[in-house]
Amino acid sequence: MTVVSVIISGGAGSRLWPLSRESHPKPLIPVSGGESLLQHAYRRALAIPGVADVVTVTNRDLLFVSDDAYRGTGVTPPRLTYVLEPQGRDTAAAVAAAVVAVESQHGADTVMCVFPADHMVGDVAGFVTAMQQAIELAGKGRLVTFGVKPTRPETGYGYIEASGTDVIRFVEKPDADTAASYLASGTFLWNSGMFCFTAATMVALLEAFAPDILDGCRKALEAARRVDGAAVTQFELDKQIFSAIRKDSIDFAVLEKAGNVSVVPCDIGWGDIGSWTAYGELLPQDADGNNVSGEVALVGTKNTIVSGSDRLVAAVGVEDMIIVDTADALLVASKDAAQDVKTLFNRLKSEGHETHLLHRTVHRPWGTYTVLEEGERFKIKRIEVKPGGRLSLQMHHHRSEHWVVVSGTARVVNGDKDMLLATNQSTYIPSGTMHRLENPGILRLVMIEVQTGDYLGEDDIVRVEDVYGRS
């Protein structure tokens, strides 16, 4: 029996703004031990005995930062597969895309262990035990979900009413009184959003309850751009076909309609890190109930979450608050309004405010850039290029650029010139000039870029050639 792990890594994590952005979403946020939620999910994926492949469903733009995250763990998988979405279409399409990809690679009898990238599991050994039980049930044609034993009357989770491994019913997020009655009954479990099934079982269920979603994913995979490496496969789903698939959750589309559903009750230290109150529980707590990270100074402050970054964050005489400081945005909210951070995020997005999309430091396949300062007609960036990293051959219509090498060696194409620049050397690139930057060395290349012009937006890029397949 072939077993694969499937990590669903999508969503902006809007309730965790400003730490989470669309281009650097919740799964990439560091948590305990300094590793990100995605890295923790990757380690769990490989902890399942006999896993032949780790399949990650994520946005096309997050491929390289996800791959860097996996490499950063130092753990080598037997195989990696990326199913790359041009845009999110909710979990039904994500699961269906994973199923058709796994079916094409490993066969219809493959058992798929599916879980989100943005959850935490404190007891990995318990997680593995639960997965092994689920794999056995899945091999018998069951669609298996995982029910977490509740520890509080939580209103932010869906519930499963169960008797042993038999599902009685699924219920949506309850109000406080209903959640309290569920907890008292002892027959309700939190719906964890984790699943286990064979590819054939899920295909049959999708054909019965969501044939349009399955058909769209099959066509998007058939038309996908496929890249095969020694131990890595990428399926870049067709943009036009996949983007036309209707949005629906796997719960609504399949789970709540299926008749062959089992549940594995488990107590594995599970948590859905879906808000600042949930994230705060992962941070160290002081004697006054404050959960803090970064350089923080507190006086007369109680039960407050404080997350700092590059500067001191101080609070005096506040209680039950959320304070999150990043390089370009500061959030101050009451704990009672933690869910409303999503409303704020959506407002920023609708107004086109850049902080919904990007951090000051932006990750790219070749490295990172950090905006140091910007004003009318100028922007200053610090650019780091990984050894072997290569930016696209590109030009800008509206801006000129000055490049100064701080450390390392840069290979620069500037119009018809191809040159090597060492530390303290520089070049000027007029607007309209084709250019490229590359790090040919074994150390990181650090540069300062000064942009000048009448428009300095990141969309003023015409890519002529790109080794990372970006348009």
Image (cartoon, grey):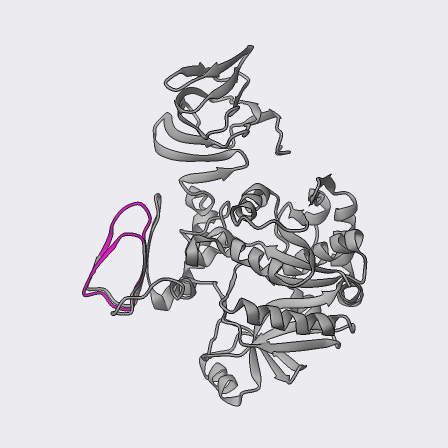
Q: Which residues are magenta?
A: 294-314
Quarter of the rendering occupied by the C terminus: top right
Residue 250, picture quadrant: bottom right
Asked if residue 111 shows in the view, the reply is yes
Q: Position of residue 75 (x, y in %)?
A: 57, 50
In-image side of 307 versus 62 (left or right): left
- In the rendered image, residue 244 lying in the magenta stretch gets the answer no
Q: Of 432 and 76, which appears nearest the observer?
A: 76
The outermost residue toward the bottom is 185
Residue at left offset 53%, top offset 79%: 149
Q: Position of residue 53 (x, y in %)?
A: 69, 54
Residue 34 in the image: x percent, y percent? 42, 53
- In which quadrant is the N terminus drawn? bottom right
Q: Residue at x 56, y 79 (%)?
A: 189
Write the residue at 42% across / 20% down: 403
> Furthest residue to the top?
416
Q: Give the image location of residue 258, x and y in percent.
A: 73, 74
Measured along the vertical axis of the image, is residue 70 above or below residue 316?
Answer: above
Is 103 or 59 nearer to us in this picture? 103
- Say if the magenta span includes residue 297: yes
Q: In the figure, residue 276 lies in which quadrant?
A: bottom left
